[in-house]
Each structure stands twice: as C-alpha cells, then as structure tokens.
Amino acid sequence: MSALDAGADRRRGRLLVAAAAVCWSAGGLMVRLVDTDPWTTVFWRGVFCASFLTAVTALRERRETGRVLAAMGSTGLAVAVCLAIASTCFIMALHRTAVANVLIIQSLSPFMAGLLGWAWMGERVAGRTWIAMSVALLGSGIMLSRYFHAADATGSLGGDLLAFTVALSFATAIVLLRRGRQLQMLPAAGLAALLTSLFASMAARPGSADARDLILLAVFGAGQLGLGMILFTAGARRIPVAEASLIAVLESVLGPLWVWLLLGENPGLPSIVGGVIVLAALAGHTAADLRLERRGVSPQAGLENRSSTGT
C-alpha cells in the first residue's frame, strides 16, 4: 500500500470511529424518548440488535456463519455475558441518574481494563496511565460529591453505581478479548444482545410498546448499538488504538449535549466539573500515546522489556 493509500485508509478509519461515537452518543437521548419501562426497553433493544448483527454476520460469512459462531467457545460466551450485563445496566442507569454521569463514568472502562490486565494477565501499566486513572477517579469523586447532602441521593447514587458496573463489565470484556485475540467481536455482541433480551423477558412487557416506541427501539437496537459496533470494528482496524480511543471519547461529550439541547436535562455543576476532569484525563492519556505512535515509538515500548526481565 502506497503512502497516499495509507493516508486515505487512516482518514477513512477516523471517520468510521467518529461515526460510531456519534451513534453511541444517542443512547441517553433514546432512553429519554421511549415511553416503555426499563425492562421492556432492554428486551426490545436486544431483540433488534441481535437480529441486525445476526443478519450482518450471515451476509458477511455466508456458509461460514455456523463455524464462526461455534468458534466463539467459552471465551466468546464470557465476553457475551459481560457485554449483556453492561448493556442492561446501561439502560437501568439512565433511568436513575443523569445521562452525563452514565457516559462519563462509562468512559473509565479503558483504565479499568488496564488494571484488570495488570492484575490478571501481568500486563505492565505505564506511569502516565496510573496518573490518568488517579485524575479520572478524582473527577468521578467530584461527580458523586453532590449526593452527600442530597435528599434523593439513594436513587441517583444507585444509577451511578450501575454506570460503574457498565464500565467494569465492558473492561472485563476487553481483557477477555485480549486473551482470545482470534475471537470475532460482532457474533459475540449479537449473542450478548440475545442474552439481554432473554434475561429482560422475565420482567418486560413487550406488548406495552406501541408503534412509535417500536420504531424508536428498532433505531436504538440496530442503529445506536448494532451499527455503532460495526462502524467501530471497521474503523479501529485502520488506525492506532490510541487514536481510536481518543475519537471514541466523543460519545461522552456528545451524549449529554444531545439531551441537554433537545430535552433540557441539565446535569448540574458537579457533574460538569467532574466530567471535564475525567474527559481531560482520558484525552490527555490517549493523546500522549498517539504522539508516541506518530514518532514511531510503541506506547508499550519498554514495558514489554521490563516485563520480560522481571524488573
């Protein structure tokens, strides 16, 4: 591939990841627009997402679809369970706290993945990552500070804890994917959507969704979640991981903005200040990695050497 073609491919990758972030950022707005209860929302979102990703996988793999699904194995099932937990808790969190809180706290998942990778797989974590995680934790603490004197603290705090569960579950899925690098993401995501629907069916009331709700839920499942996953998977293959992570932060910036502009949901000063700190930590960390990659230095350079020597 020529330098010109490589540059065009990278630009295409950036656009695809940015489009994925825009899709994902609509999650909070969609939850606010539908009139169904949380469990019914989870049910229909999972149904539409699973159907969409299954159809895409079948069209792409054709006769190999069965083999691809069977190849997921126990790792694929574990990833699907983690993603299902994250997806379910995401909807429940949005019904209990501000959209800004959910998306900002969810943005901690890359750092949680770093911690899990260090504890579980012995992966070394760079000093700048520890610093960024500490700053992000400070920002989350500021977001939670308003609950100490709030009369409705229990409900809102519960929503933020669910958002932490989203971040932790997604981080666990990332670590599992690192261990099973041959695993394809889209079939696992489709299975996760199916599991969320099966679990939610015990409490959901599918018949309570009218035609308007079903249209919105179809967009929510197939568009916001399913299409976003496809776009991110396609784009992330064309650009460095650090650059993809930096662009994906758009989700946390745009999500609260849509709800604020269209529905007037003001997240409050502590959430805004804490969110800015978290986003600054995320952007600063990924930008540092990106600068290293552009200089031809791997962000993990040196860490692998220290790991191999045991120091």
Image (cartoon, rainbow, N blue to C red):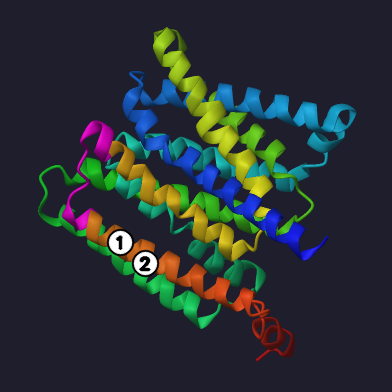
State the SS at label 2: helix
3D distance between C-alphas at marks 1 and 2: 6 Å
> From the image, which quarter does the C terminus lie in?
bottom right
Q: Is residue 141 left or right of residue 226?
A: left
* Side (left or right) of 178 relative to 202: right
In the picture of the structure, the residue carrying the numbered disc 2 is 280
Question: Outermost residue, right direction?
Answer: 63
User: Residue 262: where, in percent of width, then height?
Assistant: 27, 32
Q: Relative to residue 92, is residue 224 drawn left or right?
A: right
Q: Residues within 10 Å of mark 2 (few under 14, many from 20)?
A: some
**Mark 1 touching mark 2, by CB under 8 A?**
yes
Residue 97: which quarter of the image?
top left
Q: Is residue 112 visible?
A: yes
Q: Quadrant of residue 249?
A: bottom left
Q: Say the numbered circle drawn on residue 276.
A: 1
For the point 33% across and 18% down, the residue is 35
Is residue 264 located in the magenta-colored stretch of the structure? Answer: yes
Magenta-colored span: 260-271
Picture layout, residue 305 above or below residue 287: below
- For the point 37% across and 36% down, the residue is 28
Residue 246 image position (x, y, % from top left): 50, 60
Which quadrant: the N terminus? bottom right
Q: How dense is the environment of label 1, judged by Cα within 10 Å: few (below 14), some, or many (20 and up)?
A: some
| Residue 261 falls within the magenta-colored stretch | yes
Q: Secondary structure at mark 1?
A: helix
Q: Which amino acid, by three-letter code, is at mark 1?
A: Val
* Residue 120 sits above or below residue 73 on the image: below
- In the rendered image, residue 153, in percent from the top left (x then y), is placed at 18, 46
Residue located 79% across and 32% down the image: 60
> Can residue 201 be spotted in the picture?
no
